[in-house]
Structure formats: C-alpha cells, structure tokens
Image (cartoon, helix red, strand yellow):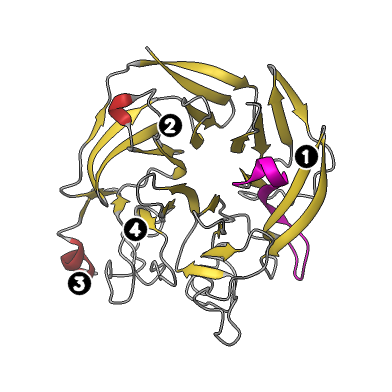
C-alpha cells in the first residue's frame, strides 16, 4: 500500500473516506447560461440512443426494449423489434443511421440479446430497415458470446468512420480479470465491421489464431461514448472507470487501453486495483477524471448555433447531472466547463440536424438547448 501511495502521489490525493481527487486537474467551471433548456420529447424512461431520419423526425431507443419514433409531436412505438434481454444495464442501447441511409435505408442498433450459448445475455449489433411503423429486413451482424447473467457493462455505442466501416463497443460484462485483455474472448473491446457485418481482413487480429477477428481495440472497461472528430476524422471515445479513472481515448488500431492492468481508479470499496497508471504498450488516455463523472454520451459541437463552442467536446455525466464542455488544443483538454447543470442523469448528448444540442435524461426525456 505504501508503494501504491508513493506512485500515485503526483496524480491523486485521498480523503479520509477513501474518495480520490486528481491533483493539478483542469478546473471545472460553470459556464454562464446563454441558452434556455427546452423539453423536446417528454415522458421517457431511459432514452439511451437517438438519431434523426432525413425528414427531421427522431428515433429514440428506450433501454426497456422499445424503439420510439417521435414525429410531429407524437411518440409512435415501432413494431417487430427483436427480443431484448433487459437486465441491469442491459437492454436496447444505441442507434445509428448508415452514412448512405438515403440510398440504402439501413438502421443499426446495439442491444442485449439472449441468443447464443450460455445463460443470460450479451451485446449484439443488428441492422434493419423501417417500413412505416415496423422494422423489416432485420439482420444480426454480430453477437458477443458466451452469454452472462451479470447485469453490468454491456457498452454500447455505434459510430461509422469516413470509409464506411462500423465501430461498436461492448463492455467487459463484469468479468474484468479475463475479458478485457483476452482477444479470444468478447467483452471489453471496440469492434470494427464492414457495413454488411463481414469482418475486414485488415483488422488487427484477423490472422491471430483463435482471436475474435472483429476486435479493433481491447483493454476497455465500459465505453458509452463515441464521436467523430470534425477535423481529423478520428473516432474518439470515453469509458467508465471504476471509482475514479473515467477516460477519453482515441480509437487506434490494435491498441490496448489497459483495463485492468493500469487504471487511475480504485475499487468501489476504496481498495487498490493496481499500483500502475502507465505501462509500455498500453495507450494512455487523452484525459481522465478523478473522481468519476460516470460519462455517457459524447458529441463534438459542429454547429454554428453556438459559435463560441465550435469544435469543443460535449460529455454527459450520469453521476453529477450535467454536461461537460471541453475545450481542446489538439489532443489536450485545456478547459472544462459545466453546462446544463442539474438537468438530471445524462444518458446521451447529440447535435441535431437543426444544429441544436440535444440531451437525453433518464426519467425525463430529451431536452434541447436554445441559444438566447
């Protein structure tokens, strides 16, 4: 324990109750409010994912397995949904339109599924089409295995890169000592597929014996935010740490992000996990939070509706009920500001086709920020 405190003394300090605080952190300030917060979709339970159809209506995933089409002020529940395994953090998760949706009509969703070996469920990626108020052409593209009855760490977010490959995240399902560092097992990974579900031959572990060939990165804990950087085209992500150690990372081919070999966090009981925060061969985070904010949802501000915020990064906080607005200098966080403070448990944040910021809040609905 003495060795542990010496190594971390330049990084974090401890209070008497075992809480951590990052030393010499970028100070979090409250941004003066230059917007009004407006409810857009009300009476939602746990709105996990949201996206917009070309005519401007919205699709919202509810964790309990419902897909909601919000159009002309009305909520329509979409029929013919696949069976969703709802347990703990698992359920219907993210949703994303294909970049060429206008031509092919494909919609992608991640969800917890009971299909496959083992009791319980695991995260799956599917694609489908929308015909009126019902799904059609449903295709399972990837299903993690084996299933687990554990209720934690399903992930999951979806993103497309500039070449049309689809990336999605799966948490380590609570099996933290095995799954994240083992490329022959699902969980604790970012995956990369072609849009039809086939596996690119240039994936980093495609030729590794017994490896899950769809894996693109490993050593992840529970990533619940992904976004394309508007200038570099790189995929950024964030993930939950344990007690402390939430991270922002850039998705890099074959990279190991360290869980649980290295971490800036500790167990929920306050005991140490490891005395290492850095190690050769492990990708360091762009930024990390101590204490944890429980990040969920991520978006770059690409809109001119908020000129002072252009190209800044938005990260929702489940724990502290606000959205962080992060100013970046390249890959370095130089300023942290709190917006939408006390809004509630933020599950997702997106930039809508109208250029406004939309914030999905558990137990409430989806708000948008209207500049004043």
Q: CA distance from mark 1 to mark 4?
A: 42 Å
Q: Nearer the viewer, mark 1 or mark 4?
A: 1
Q: Residues within 10 Å of mark 2 (few under 14, many from 20)?
A: many
Q: Nearer the viewer, mark 1 or mark 2?
A: 1
Task: Look at the image and say whether residue 369 sits in the magenta stretch.
Answer: no
What are the residue bounds of the magenta stretch? 99-120
**Front residue of 286 and 240:** 286
Q: Along the horizontal axis of the image, is 121 left or right of 96?
A: right
Residue, disc 3:
3
Q: Residue at x 35, y 62 (%)?
A: 271
**Label 4 residue SS:** loop
Q: For residue 267, which quarter of the picture?
A: bottom left
Image quarter of the N terminus: bottom left
Image quarter of the C terminus: top left
Instruction: Report x, y in % for residue 78.
Output: 79, 35
Any mark on residue 265, and which? 4
User: Nearer the N terminus, badge 1 or badge 3?
Assistant: 3
Instruction: Report x, y in % for residue 328.
Output: 26, 43
Q: Residues within 10 Å of mark 3 (few under 14, many from 20)?
A: few
**Label 2 residue SS:** loop
Q: Nearer the viewer, mark 1 or mark 3?
A: 1
Residue, disc 1:
130
Q: Along the horizontal axis of the image, is 281 left or right of 88?
A: left
Q: CA distance from mark 2 to mark 3?
A: 35 Å
Q: CA distance from mark 1 to mark 3?
A: 57 Å
Task: Look at the image and say whether residue 104 sits in the magenta stretch.
Answer: yes
**Front residue of 79 and 159:** 159
Q: CA distance from mark 4 to mark 2?
A: 21 Å
Q: CA distance from mark 3 to mark 4?
A: 16 Å
User: Nearer the N terminus, badge 3 or badge 4?
Assistant: 3
Instruction: Report x, y in % for residue 132.
Output: 82, 32
Q: Along the horizontal axis of the image, is 185 left or right of 105?
A: left
């Amino acid at each position: 324990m003495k060795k542990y405190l010496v190594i971390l003394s330049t990084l974090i300090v401890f209070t008497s109750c075992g809480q951590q605080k990052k030393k010499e952190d970028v100070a979090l300030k409250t941004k003066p409010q230059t917007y009004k917060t407006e409810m857009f979709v009300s009476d939602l339970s746990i709105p996990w994912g949201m996206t917009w159809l070309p005519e401007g209506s919205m699709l919202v995933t509810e964790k309990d397995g419902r897909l909601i089409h919000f159009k002309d002020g009305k909520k329509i529940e979409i029929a013919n949904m696949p069976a969703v395994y709802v347990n703990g953090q698992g359920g219907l998760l993210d949703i994303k339109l294909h970049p060429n949706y206008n031509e092919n009509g494909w919609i992608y969703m991640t969800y917890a599924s009971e299909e496959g070996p083992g009791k319980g469920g695991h995260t799956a990626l599917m694609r489908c089409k929308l015909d009126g108020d019902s799904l059609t052409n449903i295709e399972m593209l990837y299903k993690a295995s084996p299933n687990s009855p554990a209720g934690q760490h399903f992930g999951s977010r979806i993103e497309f890169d500039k070449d049309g490959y689809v990336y999605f995240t799966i948490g380590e399902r609570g099996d933290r000592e095995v799954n994240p560092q083992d490329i022959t097992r699902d969980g604790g990974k970012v995956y990369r597929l072609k849009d039809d579900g086939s596996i690119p031959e240039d994936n980093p572990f495609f030729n590794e014996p017994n490896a899950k060939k769809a894996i693109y990165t490993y050593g992840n804990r529970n990533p619940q935010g992904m976004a394309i950087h508007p200038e570099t085209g790189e995929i950024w992500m964030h993930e939950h740490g344990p007690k402390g150690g939430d991270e922002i990372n850039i998705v890099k081919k074959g990279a190991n992000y360290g869980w649980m070999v290295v971490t800036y966090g500790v167990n929920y009981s306050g005991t140490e996990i490891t005395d290492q925060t850095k190690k050769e061969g492990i990708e360091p985070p762009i930024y990390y939070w101590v204490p944890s904010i429980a990040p969920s949802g991520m978006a770059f501000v690409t809109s001119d509706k908020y000129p002072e915020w252009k190209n800044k990064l938005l990260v929702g906080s489940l724990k502290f009920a606000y959205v962080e607005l992060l100013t970046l200098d390249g890959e370095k966080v130089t300023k942290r500001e709190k917006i939408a403070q006390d809004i509630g448990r933020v599950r997702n944040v997106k930039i809508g086709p109208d250029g406004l910021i939309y914030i999905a809040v558990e137990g409430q609905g989806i708000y948008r920020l209207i500049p004043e």
